[in-house]
Image (cartoon, rainbow, N blue to C red):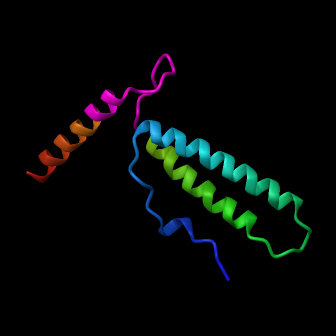
Amino acid sequence: MSSTPSPDGQRPPQLSEYSLRQALHELDAKIQTLHNRAHTTAAGSTNTYKAHAEALEAKRARLAEQLVQYPTPADGSEPSVWDQIRRGIDGLREDLRNIL
């Protein structure tokens, strides 16, 4: 028998801004599908669609919190690969400063 894992014990992954946006989009689609399945099941059935959707919503909220740290581009375009690499290098540089 499978069970839905609790989102409290899960650590959100460290993703780039583009990957975060893509993950949020995919989670939205999965959550919508689960809600639709929960609505179409018979009343009183023992489905886990609702619990699974709630767990995904909690995960989505954590990813959305991470997205706040990225500035929103004025033109709405996605950052280039070079911008992501530069941000990654800057993050590594900051981590090294904190270690030393």
* Quarter of the rendering containing residue 1: bottom right
x%, y% of residue 76? 51, 21
Main secondary structure along the magenta-highlighted residues: loop
Q: Is residue 10 above or below residue 99?
A: below
Q: Is residue 27 left or right of residue 51?
A: left
Question: In the displayed image of the protein, which residue is found farthest to the front?
Answer: 81
Is 85 positioned to the left or the right of 52 in the image?
A: left
Is residue 14 shown above or below 8? above
Looking at the image, which residue is at 16% across and 41% down?
A: 93
**Nearer-the-camera pick, 43 or 40:** 40
For the point 74% across and 70% down, which residue is it? 48
Query: What residue is at 60 percent from the left and 41 percent from the top?
Result: 25
Q: Position of residue 57 (x, y in %)?
A: 62, 54
Toward the top, the furthest residue is: 75
73 and 86: which one is in front?
86
Residue at the location (14% across, 47% down)?
Answer: 96
Residue 86 in picture, x, y percent from top left:
26, 31
Q: Position of residue 58 (x, y in %)?
A: 58, 57
**Does the magenta segment cover residue 21?**
no
What span is in magenta?
68-86
Q: Is residue 73 magenta?
A: yes
Q: Is residue 62 above or below residue 55?
A: above
Residue 18 in the figure: left or right of residue 2: left
Relative to 4, residue 53 above or below: above
Q: Decide if residue 82 is on the left or right side of residue 41.
A: left
Question: Residue pushed farthest left?
Answer: 100
Q: Residue furthest right?
A: 42
